[in-house]
Image: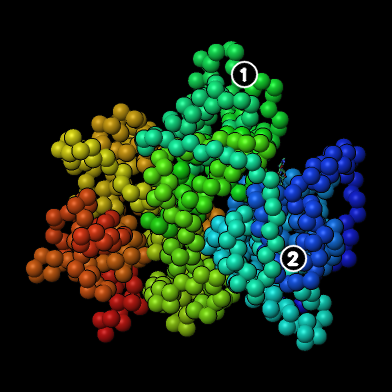
Amino acid sequence: KPYSSSDRRSGNAAKQPEHVTEALRQKARELAKHRKQLPIFSARETIIKEVKDNACVIIVGETGSGKTTQIPQYFMEAGLSAHGTIAVTQPRRVAAINLAKRVAQEVGTTIGNQVGYSIRFDDTSSKGTKIKYMTDGIMLRELLSDRLLLNYSVIVLDEAHERTLRTDILFGMVKSIQKQRAEMIEQGKKGIEPLKIVVMSATLDAEKFSAYFYNAKIMYISGRMYPVKVLNTIEPQSDYVDAALVTAFQIHQEETAGDILIFLTGQEEIENLEKLIEEYSVDLPTRFGKLIPCPIFAAQDSATQQKIFEPTPAGCRKVILATNIAETSITIPNIRYVVDTGCHKSRGYNAKIGIESLLIEPISKSSARQRMGRAGREAPGLCFRLYTEDSFEQLEEDTVPEIKRCNLASAILALKASGVEDVTKFDYMDRPSKSGLLKSMEQLYALGALDDKGDLTEMGKKMAGFPVDPPYAKVLLQSEVMECTKEAIEIIALLSVDTIFTFPSNKREEANEARQKFLSLDGDHLSLLNVLRGYESVKGDRDWCRENFINGRHMRHVLEVRKQLIEFSERAGINPRTSCGHDYEIVLKCFLAGFFQNAALLQPDSTYKAVVGGLTVNIHPSSAMFGKKRAAIMYNELVFTTKHYIRGVSAIEASWLAQAAPKYFGQRQA
Ligand code: ADP
Ligand code: MG
């Protein structure tokens, strides 16, 4: 019954439940003063009026001006939550939790009452929830069960400047829902209320959002900004963690009071640097106060996370170690010094296998400016860029929207799973190319995710639930049938890094020789597995890695990805421990189920010709199959350099093809 007005929240005025203690009320009264001092406070009445008068509003404001914490409260105070919850979407889980907790304090309640959050596997919202912070992924999921978002009165799309694939899809979805609801109201349908859309961004280029949402008015909230002096390194730094360590101690010993914020790319780096700071602090002359490392990342208990917001003890200095979550999502007080490593993990997407959040990349100029800005919120500050001025000039101006750079097959799956039937007509803010869309749809059809009418199949629904590109998702699903999930997960994890071998230019011969003992006659997939077996048998020993020319850093990364894939399989009800033992043919067949479109056959002239498209492809010199002649091969990726090179290559039998994709090859042969 998608059109019923089953508003489970209506008429449920939040009573003051017994958990609201005097202590909570007292805390809220204290915070009320702080709330009134935020830059956004002077715009309170205007914002409320604009949102009441208009269907869409765009709000731009410097990070820390109070957008995310205050605006939803203003709406609640103005009665906008009378007919539904106010939803605030966030690209990151940690931000959703943190912001909800802060707002609960300001409101004078505990999480799960008027204020709650919802992230995957953790939903604290309840009937009385008026303000709900949620990840964009959860909002998309919500659409699967509440197509018109009737539980909501206002959707705040926060951090819009990040342009994640999910936020981009949400833009189109909420726009269409708003229109549908307006039409139903016009037709006199009972119990339907209009949906308000608020888009919030920390960067100034909001015209695009405005143009997309019917030229909605852009409100600019001026923040307070003090000058920040930027210092670049003279030479490029080979190890930015090390450089950050040195810089932190230098600041501590030479600069006036104020905390340090270091931008790193992930938990592993953060924990490394935390240890290093602790080690080196021991030798710090006593006339300097303590240097206290405060890490912040997702997998962390909330008490530790709270530490970053607590006042710094007198004479000491905090060093906040954060990812780009501290760029615009959460504001940390008292920062005077920013150390910018110039890198981030390309959140949500590794183009190699389409897995989420794994690729370390240079940031954009606009990110670098945001990072710099964090030093000047309360007083003039300093920003240490651990890269040269030249490197800065070479950065991209803005981060490219994910929808422009990621495989569309996964975007299409997500759209279809949210009920969009014709993905070519979807109202994109940045439209992917039509040929790209059609090609991706063909691919999904061949994989069995779409049927011949272009509708999502059961298989497609399952694939949509995996955070990897569709061919890899297919391999994982197929591995359940073929009983080789353990091996499939391991190989996918191994393929997620560029290479696990090292080739120092002065030791090429030795490196090559060392590599030989891992190589399988059947190609790269099984060779990779051999390396992992070796690596695990010595428990990742560093000396072993060095002797065997294995990149230890990449291997640790592989184990991380494997862990993620194991978790996702378990959630999907697939046993990640099912192993095919030494029957490796099964593993190759399983991969072929996802990669049959990447098969090539040996020609009489000893070249390989792709089965689909007929391109002549060359086995990359780094492949275990280089120089080998087998009747049929499959590969994971095609790279264009001077030639069409293929990587991740293994031998197959041509007869497996029809088995792997009967629909596809059956048709072609007929
Ligand atoms: P914006 O969304 O505009 O970047 P926020 O609403 O997130 O701003 O933050 C407004 C202010 O609230 C910040 O400047 C900071 O002082 C304060 N604040 C936010 N979260 C917390 C927290 N968890 N603990 C302490 N102060 C916080
Ligand atoms: Mg914000």
Q: Is residue 118 above or below residue 433?
A: above
List the residue tagged with mark 1. Answer: 289
- In the structure shown, which secondary structural element does the residue marked by tag 1 occupy? loop
Q: From where the camera sits, is residue 188 visible?
A: yes
Residue displayed at 77% across by 66% down:
50
x and y percent of residue 340 in the render?
Answer: 50, 39
Residue displayed at 15% across by 38% down:
509
Q: Could you tell me the amino acid type at mark 2?
A: Val
- Alpha-carbon distance for marks 1 and 2? 48 Å
Q: Quadrant of residue 416?
A: bottom right
Q: From where the camera sits, is residue 267 visible?
A: no
x and y percent of residue 432 in the render?
Answer: 46, 72
Q: Could you tell me the amino acid type at mark 1?
A: Gly
Q: Is residue 384 above or below residue 93?
A: above
| Furthest residue toward top | 286
List the residue tagged with mark 2. Answer: 154
Color scheme of the displayed model: rainbow
x and y percent of residue 153 in the render?
Answer: 76, 67
Q: Nearer the viewer, residue 286 or 365?
A: 365
What is the quadrant of the N terminus in the image? bottom right
x and y percent of residue 35 in the render?
Answer: 80, 46
- In the structure shown, which secondary structural element does the residue marked by tag 2 occupy? strand
Q: Nearer the viewer, residue 120 or 587?
A: 120
Q: Quadrant of residue 428?
A: bottom right
